[in-house]
Image: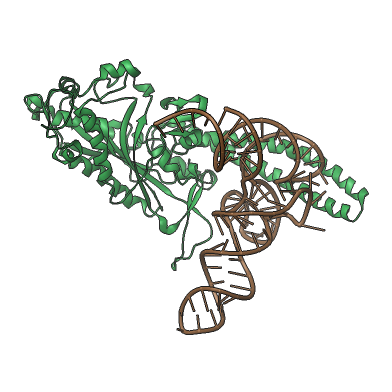
Chain colours: A green, B brown
Amino acid sequence: MIDQRLLRTDLDGLRTALTRRARPAIIDELEHAARLDSRLRDITVERDECRARVNSISKEVGALRRDGNVEAAEKLQAESRELGGREKGLAAEHDEVSAALHELLLGIPNAPHPDVPDGASDADNPTIVGPVATHATYPAHQRVPHWETAEALGILDNERAVKVSGAMFTMQRGAGATLARALCQYGLDANADAFEEIRAPSLVSTATLTATGQLPKFADDAYAIERDDLWAIPTAEVPLTSIYGDEILDYDELPMRFMAYSPAYRREAGAAGRDTRGMLRAHEFDKVEILALATPEQAPDLLVEMRNRAERAIARLELPYRVIEICTGDLGQSHHRSFDVEVYAPGADDWLEVSSVSWFSDYQARRANIRFRRVDDDGKPLKGTDLVHTLNGSALAVPRVWAAIIENYRNADGSVTVPELLRPYMRGLMRIEPRSGPTVEA
RNA sequence: GGAACGGUGGCAGAGCGGACGAAUGCACCCGCCUUGAAAGCGGACGAGGUGAAAGCCUCCGAGGGUUCGAAUCCCUCCCGUUCCGCCA
């Protein structure tokens, strides 16, 4: 959520920043919010004056009754009753305007960081790092889509996944299942030097899903368990961000760093019929997420560090990749600045997004109410609190890396070499051969 | 799922219709004392909104109600603890 105070202290600045997102409707909402805020303030002042009067009368009544002056007390009570009626009306109006404003504010996206490049859509995202791989540079035996290779090897059985759960669910078998789990373990191990591992709930409350920005605007993208008022998480970012919700952190605890493996559930409401084959897009997938709570001063360096970690995880698997920066027109609702890591899949002939690392400034922290207390030069806590900044990124998104490995490591005979780094996680398996069943090398 | 008891400041815990944003203890912070520390003594000590400031307003799980006035009384909901049931 954007800072409500800015609506009156720096509306022009907000307007300028949000205009860069290239969506005029946002500006209309912003102007509307500013008008509501101004009205709310007038009503609040009037209501509070009313309340102050009632409070002071009540004190007087108490004093008068103790002194036995019943007559004077009753006279004041009558006045207070009248004021009370007026207060009630004003309070109702206040609540109404306040709720409308809050609703509006929840839908207004974060302001992009000044360094975010301008652009209208994902076509304008500049490439920061990486070669330009082309289909033609790959030998024919690598230009086979992973779903064909994997099905032939018996390690992917989406047909039966569909039987069990429906379209856009996947199922890995044998070495394919082991590979998926190995990638999780690899992703965690690669970040264990600096991040605390968390095993968080995968079902969360409405408040928790609102804190990170998925609700209320993107309710259609999430799986809801209505009977129990719970939601299936679309990423571990959701529970991790809210761990310290409604808390005030000590300065020297920051930055706090967490990592988690979790399943991720997405309805993919707008994507029906897209990427339906193989492992490119599914309603449920595994992911390792890294996340930090930081001071505003720490955030920029952390963004770089986390981006490097995401990049290195792919680089060490020796997969062709590139890093792109997300331009203003493609920046997510809650994002202040973002980078994506994409891996090249020669079979699908496509760049697959395998990580998105983002800085949210205080946008999520305001919704989740995560604050910290600054300290002076001697380390003494100062009065007042500030909102933390949140950052997170996928350390490793399993299915697309899985797909990229199957395609990039495919041999001419149709087998797939296991990347060396992953062998310890796969009981030493060096090659996935066309057979299902046990995955221990003879 | 059934029953009982609870939800108050960083923690523990009083308060049960008026002087309560809230006793007291612990923790934390600032002084004094001390070579240093501990102990002791004195002081400060929740968060948010609004205002130049004084001040004013809000918050005792959430929402409603009663009252001139609610942490305190009533209703609804949520959450927790314990016991029983069930269960990996």
From the viewer's perspective, tell me whether residue B44 is left or right of residue A240.
right
> Residue A285, relative to residue A168: is it above or below?
below
Quarter of the image with the C terminus of chain A is top left
Residue A355 showing in the rendered view? yes
Residue A283, quarter of picture: top left
* Residue A130 in the image, given as x and y percentages of width and height: 18, 40
Q: Nearer the viewer, residue B8 or A167?
A: B8
Residue A357 showing in the rendered view? no
Residue A243, quarter of picture: top left
> Residue A296, relative to residue A42: is it above or below?
below
Determine the residue positioned at 53% across, 46% down.
A5
Residue A314, quarter of picture: top left
From the viewer's perspective, tell me whether residue A270 is left or right of residue A321.
right
Q: Nearer the viewer, residue A80 or B72?
A: B72
Determine the residue positioned at 74% across, 40% down.
A87
From the viewer's perspective, tell me whether residue A307 is left or right of residue A39.
left
Q: Nearer the viewer, residue A100 or A399?
A: A399
Task: Tally the numbered discs.
Answer: 0
From the viewer's perspective, tell me whether residue A212 is left or right of residue A119.
right
Q: Nearer the viewer, residue A38 or A135?
A: A135
* Residue A343 in the image, given as x and y percentages of width and height: 21, 34
Determine the residue positioned at 50% across, 49% down.
A247
* Residue A193 in the image, given as x and y percentages of width and height: 28, 51
* Residue A213 in the image, given as x and y percentages of width and height: 44, 36
